[in-house]
Image (cartoon, helix red, strand yellow):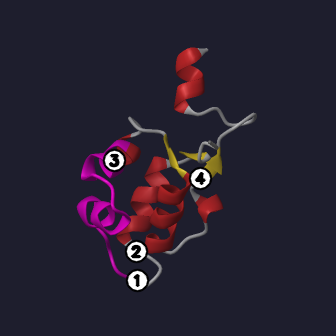
Amino acid sequence: MTREPRYALLKPHTMRDLMTRTGDGSEITGRALAKAVGVPHGTIDGLLTGKTRTQPAHVAREICRIIGVDVGCLWAETGRKVADETTEATA
């Protein structure tokens, strides 16, 4: 079974700024974003505070779709050059 790639949020403050004016000009709260993405609101809170650093690719893509930016504006795929949380925990 292949593990879904994870993406690391590069700049939580940028995500917070982009949430104040999404691609359609509206603002979205953390709770509303979480509901739209289909994740617990604590996931978005953790990303915005830096407590949570990575998410599965489908979550990162959905966050970006909803706020109206390309994935590369906020996220980097983890792997050899960008460690994910599980790699750092075992190192």
The residue carrying pointer 2 sits among few (fewer than 14), some (14 to 19) or many (20 or more) residues within 10 Å by Cα, namely some
Q: Main secondary structure of the magenta part?
A: helix
N-terminal-most mark, 2 or 3: 2
**Which residue is labeled 1 in the image?**
25
In depth, the one of 2 and 31 nearer the eye is 2
Amino acid type of the residue that numbered disc 1 sits on in the rendered structure = Gly
Proximity of marks 2 and 4: CB atoms separated by less than 8 Å: no
Mark 3 → mark 4, Cα distance in angstroms: 15 Å
Mark 2 → mark 1, Cα distance in angstroms: 5 Å
Q: Residue 43 carries which label?
A: 3
Proximity of marks 3 and 4: CB atoms separated by less than 8 Å: no
The residue carrying pointer 4 sits among few (fewer than 14), some (14 to 19) or many (20 or more) residues within 10 Å by Cα, namely many
Q: Which mark is residue 11?
A: none
Quadrant in the picture for the N terminus: top right
Magenta residues (range): 26-46
Q: Residue 21 carries which label?
A: 2
Please identify, in this view, whether the residue under mark 2 or under mark 3 is nearer the observer.
Answer: 3
